[in-house]
């Protein structure tokens, strides 16, 4: 009897301790999950509305972007130009992007369509966003984004401050030959490029482009392989004729 009472008393005092340990473990698990989530977010690299280099296009993603940016328009099989400002900007400042742009297009300037999905937003301003136009282009092969283009005539100083807080101080592009400010960030090979150019109206033409360089290179590699295969098939077909 005495042993049974001692066990009951011991359990009564032990129960709060066990509950406390359980609570600590739950908090630790919650903290680990939060830390893992933050690490995953940081690992995403350069993002726009949580669209990053490893994002895959889907109808669910399209629905989510519509909720943030307003109604969209969609196009399949599009031409691609990576040029930012003028025809020699990339050649002078971003030779890797310049070479990729040449591989995406023919020297003769012929129309070249790529297996892509383009989302376009022209009513983001109605969602209280300072964007006049937003364009996201995805590879239809991998589903990953190739580039994101944003244009605005609004004051983007608050957004530029946010970019500096997230990615640090940018590198400056020397464009002393003309008006405007140009600066960029690099992250895991990808490039976030910003230009702010005064216009004759007295406002500023602001452009932001995110180039997902590895994704662009992957698309170029796939297309060049397909072209080589088709050329080989044509060669073999020609050999059978004579």
Image (cartoon, rainbow, N blue to C red):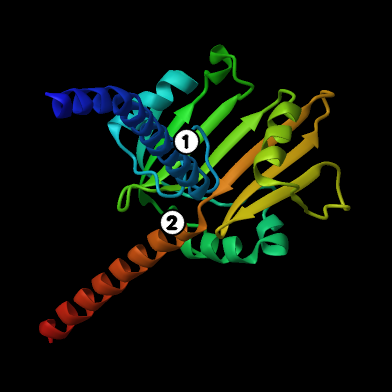
Residue 7 horizontal side relative to residue 124, left or right: left
Q: Secondary structure at mark 2?
A: helix
Between residues 157 and 233, which one lies in front from this camera angle?
A: 157
- Which x, y percent locates residue 120? 46, 30
Q: Between label 1 and label 2, give the one nearer the viewer.
A: 1
Q: Residue at x 63, y 32 (%)?
A: 151
The relative height of residue 99 versus residue 203 in the rendered view (above or below) is: below
Q: Badge 2 is on which residue? A: 215
The relative height of residue 112 versus residue 8 in the rendered view (above or below) is: below
- Which x, y percent locates residue 16? 34, 24
The relative height of residue 188 versus residue 40 in the rendered view (above or below) is: below
Alpha carbon of mark 1 to alpha carbon of mark 2: how far? 17 Å
Q: Residue at x 60, y 53 (%)?
A: 191
Q: Which mark is residue 225?
A: none
Q: Badge 1 is on which residue? A: 50
**What quarter of the picture does the N terminus occupy?**
top left
- Which x, y percent locates residue 240? 11, 83
Residue 221 visible at all = yes
Residue 192 horizontal side relative to residue 73, left or right: right
**What quarter of the picture does the C terminus occupy?**
bottom left
- Which x, y percent locates residue 14? 30, 29
């Amino acid at each position: 009897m005495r042993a049974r009472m001692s066990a009951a008393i011991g359990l009564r005092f032990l129960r709060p301790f066990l509950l406390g340990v359980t609570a600590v473990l739950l908090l630790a698990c919650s903290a680990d999950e939060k830390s893992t989530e933050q690490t995953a977010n940081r690992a995403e690299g350069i993002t726009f509305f949580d669209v990053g280099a490893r994002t895959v296009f889907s109808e669910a993603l399209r629905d989510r972007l519509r909720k943030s940016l307003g109604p969209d328009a969609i196009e399949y099989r599009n031409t691609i130009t990576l040029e930012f400002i003028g025809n020699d900007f990339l050649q002078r400042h971003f030779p890797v992007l310049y070479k990729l742009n040449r591989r995406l297009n023919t020297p003769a300037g012929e129309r070249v369509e790529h297996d892509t999905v383009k989302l376009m937003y022209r009513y983001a301003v109605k969602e209280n966003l300072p964007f006049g136009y937003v364009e996201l282009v995805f590879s239809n092969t991998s589903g990953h984004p190739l580039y994101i283009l944003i244009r605005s005539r609004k004051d983007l100083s608050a957004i530029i401050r946010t970019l500096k807080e997230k990615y640090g101080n940018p590198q400056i592009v020397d464009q002393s030959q003309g008006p405007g400010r140009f600066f960029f960030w690099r992250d895991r090979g990808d490039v976030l490029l910003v230009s702010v150019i005064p216009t004759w109206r007295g406002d500023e033409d602001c452009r932001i482009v995110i180039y997902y360089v590895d994704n662009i290179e992957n698309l170029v590699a796939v297309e060049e392989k397909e072209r080589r295969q088709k050329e080989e098939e044509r060669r073999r077909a020609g050999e059978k004729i004579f």
